[in-house]
Image: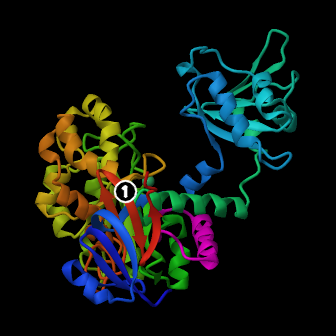
Amino acid sequence: MREEAILFAGCKPEVAAFGDRIVAVGPRARAAAGKKAQVVKLHGTAWPGLIDSHIHLEGLADRKLAVDLAPAASLADVLKRVKTWSKDLPKGAWVFGNGWYNDAWPERAFPNKEQLDSAVGRRPAYLRRKDGHSAWVSTEALRIAGIDRTTADPPGGSIDRDAAGEPTGIVREMAMELVDRHLAPATEAQLDEGLAQVLDDLACLGLTAVHSMDTPRGLSALQRLRAKGPLPVRVTYNLPVADLAYAERIGIRSGWGDPWLRVWGVKAFVDGSLGSRTAEMLDGTGIARLTQAELEEIADRCAKAELNVCWHAIGDGAVRRALDALTPHRDAWRIWRPRLEHAQCVNPKDMTRMAKLGVIASMQPIHAVSDRELADREWPEVAKNAYAWRALERAGVRLAFGSDAPVETADPLQGIEAATAWRKTAKWHPELALTRASALRAYTADAAYAAGLEDDLGALRPGKLCDITVVEDGKVEATVAGGRVTFRRKRA
Ligand SMILES: [Zn+2]
């Protein structure tokens, strides 16, 4: 860490830091920084560094290791992207991709292996269709998988064949596994490189910290990156409930680590999702992924181990059961900050109770934009209280905002827009929209609180870590984490 004075000048307010901490803000900043300070000239409004409270870093890194075909508008476009993406791969490496969607191309027909070979040559290639129910593979991939004209369709799957009985290069449902199982998992070096790019991307979006929902594979990669040099974004890691027993055994507690990389909560799934119609609703529909006894046991063990909980609960039924399980643990220990992830449907009767129990609503405003039609169609009564940011705020529930990327874009400015102006322009229960100040608080001070970092992050104030997001004309101008510039927009 550089132990020197630095002045972030030209932005409003100006900020002086020494090393990685803020020493003065506003009119006093220049004097506090002194004449010898390094000066970083910026333009725009300086906000406390934006924090994403729910993100999947491994999912984002895995996308970097595959070619994204969702934006392609035609077969030729897909082939061009595949060709560009695979040209620097080592010999024999698999070409892996996602998101092609022939229903949206002018040609519509399913593509074939010869077309794919024209882009990848003799490499094995496996490209999953947008819906995940079929894959388009190259001649070499078929050869490696041992699929030829004599191969029978596996139970629950099919191999497309031409008039002569030759596989065409499309495998469906369970037949995908015949190829899938030969795909080499990403190496550590590939994962690290993908993850490093992801963290840089997040800094470009104005993020200075994230709360990740990952597995030990992601945590290991973060530690390797951290050993190589400073991270551009702070990461608070939430572990899957499957690893709770290990955390208990080694005695790890929420907050272990430092503000760059630390451990916080235990992630468990109470129910499913709106999109797959598996959200557990009070009307009895949906799927309960954990029984009440299991939830109670997890709450009990986490409270004893001084670990926090981050429970995925989307339906109003799941939210109520989660609150029931958390009720006996109110103030379980000094920094007990239970969170419900998503909390998309909260029955109004449960809102005050949620606030009294100190349960944080970790929500992703951008989900509302995608789910609005579905919610109106499937659960018209519930939709009136869905994504109820303002009602929750009024009931005293603390909101921590995030993106759920890669499910949605990680761009926090789009999230702020969704939580504020969008609800009004879309005329979707506009009374539930937040003010800009409230939305910003959910991405800064309250997001910091939701990971027990409120003493260090979430405000531009002397003594806090120097994390700043500078915004001008609706665009991120610069990002600063720990007094270090992690992104700067190029000026024309
Ligand atoms: Zn998620």
Magenta span contains residue 220: yes
- Residue 79, above or below 87: above
The structure residue drawn at horizontal position 62% and vertical position 79%, both measured from the top left corner, is 227
Q: Which residue is mark 1?
A: 476
Q: How is the image coloured?
A: rainbow
Is residue 297 visible from the viewing direction of this image?
A: no
63 lies above or below 257: above
Rendering coords of residue 300 (x, y %) = 37, 74
Given residues 295 and 179, the one toward you in this image is 179
Name the side, left or right, on which 119 lies relative to 55: right
When asked about the image quadrant of residue 160, the answer is: top right
Above or below residue 405? Residue 235 is below
Q: Is residue 356 above or below residue 87?
A: below
Asked which quadrant contains residue 393, the reply is bottom left
Residue 78 visible to the viewer: yes
- Taking the image as shown, residue 37 lies to the left or right of residue 112, namely left
Q: Is mark 1 within 8 Å of ligand 1?
A: no
Residue at image coords 43%, 89%: 4
Q: Residues within 10 Å of mark 1 (few under 14, many from 20)?
A: many
The magenta segment:
212-236
Residue 31: percent from the left, percent from the top? 26, 88
Indicate whether residue 393 is drawn in magenta. Answer: no
User: For residue 47, which quarter of the picture?
Assistant: bottom left
Q: In the visual, does 106 lie left or right of 127?
A: left
Give how far across and how far down residue 444 sits, in percent. 29, 67
User: Foreground residue, 276 or 463?
Assistant: 463
Callout 1, which amino acid?
Val
Q: Is residue 475 left or right of residue 490?
A: left
* Residue at 59 percent of width and 55 percent of height: 61
> Where residue 221 appears, x then y in whole percent?
62, 68
Please count the marks in the image: 1
